[in-house]
Image: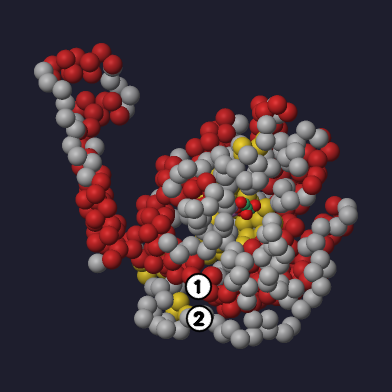
Amino acid sequence: MAEIFKDIKKIEYAGKNTKNPLAFRYYDADRIIMGKKMSEHLPFAMAWWHNLCAAGTDMFGRDTADKSFGTEKGTMAHAKAKVDAGFEFMQKLGIGYFCFHDVDIVPEAENINETNRRLDEITDYMLEKMKDTGIKCLWGTANMFSNPRFMNGAGSTNSLDVYCFAAAQIKKALELTVKLGGRGYVFWGGREGYETLLNTDVKFEQENIAALMKMAVEYGRSIGFTGDFYIEPKPKEPMKHQYDFDAATAIGFLRQYGLDRDFKLNIEANHATLAGHTFRHELRISAINEMLGSIDANQGDYLLGWDTDEFPYDVYESTMCMYEVLKAGGLTGGFNFDAKNRRPSNTYEDMFHAYILGMDTFALGLIKAAELIEDGELDSFVEKKYESFKGELGQRIRTGNATLAELADRAAEMGSCPTPDSGRQEYLEGIVNRVMFG
Ligand code: XLS
Ligand code: NI
Ligand code: NI
């Protein structure tokens, strides 16, 4: 097998002052941060679909990049070339994991039996590469949004046949995830939503999605899948209203249908901002509900209202993300770069620049988040802010042993109106800047 990215050698850590564009400035895999190696804090994953499949096509124009890897697209030879390219790429960057949809790894055939046969063949090949390189699978998923059969949804479809087809895809994708030893299995419900209530029974659709997820859990556990299932919340795009709007909505749904023991969330930065939240808000909401599982590491553009899936370069955001992740005790999943090169960045070298940028952005975010925690000022401020609840009455409120009447009595005894302390936001923002920029 010939080398594909011939002009690019293994990407090494060269320190922050290096002028070498094909080196890491901050990602130093073995460096210890808060007692753990950077590579353990940051299990990075390559997204098969963006890196090996997407070639720049948008609504207004065709591919700008060549991702044929010397073969004819849509063939099994191309599918194999993508495996070769993917593993060479991950090895050269020191990326330990990948994520995939069923249709990313083989061309879909006319009937599902032939598609499944192709999937068996390609995953045998992937497995060999995994053994040779030590690269692992972070998560698998079924693409239940691209094919026209899913135009009315997958779990939310009105068609029993389509529902069964979706079930068949999930069954196979779960088997492949188990075969490849994946840590997780994702449900991203791109078509699980609606355009208009005039033709939609929302309750019926949500119940059917939950039923499909329940069957997936039962089947997954029966074939030895011990990892986490994930919902990846997103409020819109492609549908106008998507049922997994944000973390809070998805958590409510999982609890309502008894799925919360098997599911966690896969939080994507750009989906958070589409929902009108910050990335860190979604991480915090997931973490406090013990559902922070994995992360799709990308960033959006504040001037554009869609999922632009850019490689993250915003260190302030990655610092706040890593602050949440460190506080939550890390991820059971990893950091999947669900991100793509901009359409005009169309060379092989650009693919490497994109990952170097993303990995360095998170490495620097990790370093700065650890410094913020070690600095301790933010923590001690928050600790102090809620101090008034430390006393006897506060503790009884916290443990559910106080009554409204006794609290009202206390208010009545005060004589004057209480005055809370300053939130000191600007002071705290200054601390973040001090720690980040010294
Ligand atoms: C789309 C999603 C998708 C999921 C996997 O917006 O981010 O890429 O991560 O289906
Ligand atoms: Ni995603
Ligand atoms: Ni997305």
Farthest front residue in view: 60
Residue 262 vs residue 43, the one in the foreground: 43
Left or right: 197 with respect to 263? right
Q: Residue at x 72, y 48 (%)?
A: 145
Tell me the residue at 68%/72% (across/down).
Answer: 65
Relative to 162, say whether 431 is above or below. below
CA–CA distance in space, label 2 to label 1:
8 Å
**Residue 179 location, x and y as percent?**
71, 59
Badge 1 marks a residue whose secondary structure is helix
Near mark 2 (Cα within 10 A), the count class, few <14, some 14-19 or many ≥20, is many
Q: Which amino acid type is shown beneath numbered disc 2?
A: Leu
User: Is residue 345 or residue 156 the one in the foreground?
Assistant: 345
| Horizontal arrangement in the rendering, residue 251 relative to residue 437 (left or right) | right
Residue at position x 48%, y 70% in the image = 357
Residue matched to label 2? 22
Quarter of the image with the N terminus is bottom right
Where's the C terminus, which quadrant? Answer: bottom left
Q: Is residue 302 left or right of residue 261?
A: left
State the image coordinates of residue 134 (x, y, percent, origin top left). Answer: 60, 72
Residue 310 visible: yes
Quarter of image, res 76: bottom right
Label 2 with label 1: CB-CB less than 8 Å: yes
Q: x, y (%) of residue 271?
A: 54, 48
Numbered badge on residue 47:
none
User: Which residue matches tag 1?
Assistant: 356
- Return the disc, 2 or 1, that comes first in the chain's sequence: 2
Task: State the image quarter where residue 421 is shown.
Answer: top left
Seen in the picture, residue 123 relative to 379 is either above or below; the reply is below
> Amino acid under label 1?
Ile
Residue at 72 percent across and 47 percent down: it is 144
Q: In which quarter of the image is residue 407?
A: top left
